[in-house]
Image: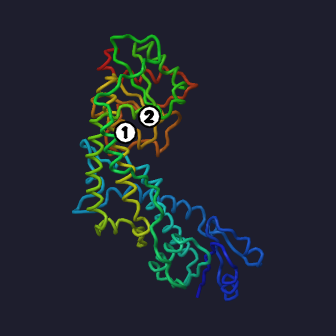
């Protein structure tokens, strides 16, 4: 029989005993192998065992699971994308990056692929674990079951991976709504000279206030060439436009999302969706649904509605410029622009990679996407902006 010891740390006694019986010792990524070295035991890192191809497959499994999860049927034949709708747009588009990077599901899919690759490469018949973390040991145990490999010892008790959700108390939300202004405040003064008063402004929504100075060359060229003044509101400043209407809309969204959470929580389809190649991990990722429906999406809706208030109620711009905004926030702002009937233009500060680009099925789309660096000629970017707002500005 081919025996395998998966090392996570601790005492080398069991590893020595199994090695003396002919077992191979493999160290899990990040494991401290000092005890094995002191004991004179040969050990190979898992990365070397499964190779670059296996590591790439594990990362691909995480990305693929995150991309497909929102599209598989969960309840009554409907997917998460179908269920969570707001302003005729699926809120899934406003959470894809969050799901991929902040929830447990994609990481569990990566663990499952890693464990399966390890078992396939080593062709192990039996596996022992020493000092492995609870999620890793749980997933490895289930991978052994899926592959028909004997896993020694009791299967670890599955516990949900810790959630980072930040919940607000209902009385505080009600108080915030009561104290919210009835109407939106005016926008700041334009940051560029040379614009024409009769031309609607360009609303610029950078991620941070510190990002605004880098945009000055582009905004000055826009003001000079298109006569369009620029009004800059950093995303952190959107809270000023959380009016009573926004508070009511956010409250309605929270009620809707909580209803979805109640219906989905114990749905068999949700449980079945948390699996990769026959290895299930719904119990490990049990906090994901709360993180998405009670944490991230209510905040995304609040941002969307505040942006609608700013765009349609205060700024009334000819165009919304989104420079360097993260994908989830960017999609919320594009959806807000679409709801207000104003074209949005996305500006990437460097060559956009696959993670930066939006697919054709990714919800409301910007009128244009362009690349512009602060040290580059703004003329090509301004030409694209002119095309995006030609009908509104009347400048050809």
The dot on residue 303 is: 1
Which callout, 2 or 1, points at the residue further toward the start of the chain? Answer: 2
Give the left or right position of residue 19, taking residue 89 as reference: right
Image quarter of residue 335? top left
> Label 2, label 1: how many angstroms apart (C-alpha)?
9 Å
Residue 248's image quarter?
A: top left
Structural crowding at the residue carrying mark 1, measured as other residues with C-alpha within 10 Å and reported as few (<14), some (14–19) or many (≥20): many
Report crowding for label 2: few under 14, some 14 to 19, many 20 or more residues within 10 A (C-alpha): some
Q: Is residue 138 above or below residue 217?
A: below
Q: Residue furthest left?
A: 76
Whole-percent x and y of residue 283?
A: 41, 70
Which residue corresponds to the image point at 65% horizontal and 73% vertical from the top-left?
Answer: 9
Q: Are marks 2 and 1 in contact (CB under 8 Å)?
A: yes
Picture quadrant where residue 383 is located: top left
Quadrant occupied by the C terminus: top left
Return the mark for residue 235: 2
Question: Where is residue 244 drawn, in percent x and y?
Answer: 28, 35
């Amino acid at each position: 029989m081919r025996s395998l010891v998966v090392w996570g740390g601790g005492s080398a006694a069991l590893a020595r005993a199994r090695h003396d019986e002919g077992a191979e010792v493999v160290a899990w990524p990040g494991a401290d192998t000092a005890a094995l070295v002191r004991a004179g035991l040969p050990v190979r890192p898992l990365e070397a065992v499964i190779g670059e191809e296996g590591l790439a497959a594990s990362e691909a499994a995480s990305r693929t699971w995150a991309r497909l999860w929102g599209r598989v049927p969960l309840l009554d034949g409907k997917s998460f994308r179908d269920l969570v709708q707001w302003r005729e747009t699926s809120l899934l588009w406003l959470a894809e990056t969050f799901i991929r990077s902040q929830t447990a599901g994609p990481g569990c899919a990566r663990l499952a692929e890693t464990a399966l690759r390890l078992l396939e490469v080593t062709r192990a018949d039996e596996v022992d674990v020493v000092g492995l973390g609870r999620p890793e040991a749980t997933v490895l145990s289930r991978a052994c079951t899926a592959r028909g490999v004997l896993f020694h010892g009791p299967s670890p008790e599955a516990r949900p991976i810790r959630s980072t959700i930040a919940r607000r108390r209902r009385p505080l939300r009600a108080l915030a709504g009561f104290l919210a202004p009835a109407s939106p405040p005016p926008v700041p003064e334009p940051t560029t000279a040379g614009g024409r008063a009769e031309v609607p402004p360009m609303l610029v929504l950078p991620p941070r206030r510190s990002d605004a100075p880098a945009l000055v060359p582009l905004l000055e060229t826009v003001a000079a060439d298109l006569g369009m003044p620029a009004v800059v509101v950093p995303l952190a400043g959107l809270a000023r436009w959380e009016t009573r209407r926004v508070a009511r809309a956010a409250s309605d969204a929270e009620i809707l999302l909580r209803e979805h959470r109640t219906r989905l929580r114990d749905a068999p389809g949700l449980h079945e969706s948390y699996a990769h190649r026959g290895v299930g991990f719904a119990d490990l990722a049990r906090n994901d649904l709360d993180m998405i429906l009670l944490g991230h999406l209510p905040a995304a809706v609040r941002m969307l509605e505040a942006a609608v208030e700013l765009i349609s109620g205060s700024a009334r711009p000819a165009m919304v410029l989104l420079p360097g905004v993260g994908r989830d926030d960017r999609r919320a702002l594009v959806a807000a622009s679409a709801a207000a009937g104003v074209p949005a233009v996305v500006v990437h500060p460097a060559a956009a990679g696959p993670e930066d680009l939006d697919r054709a099925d990714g919800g409301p789309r910007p009128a244009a996407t362009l690349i512009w660096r602060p040290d580059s000629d703004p003329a090509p970017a301004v030409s694209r902006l002119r095309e995006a707002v030609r009908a509104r500005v009347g400048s050809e």
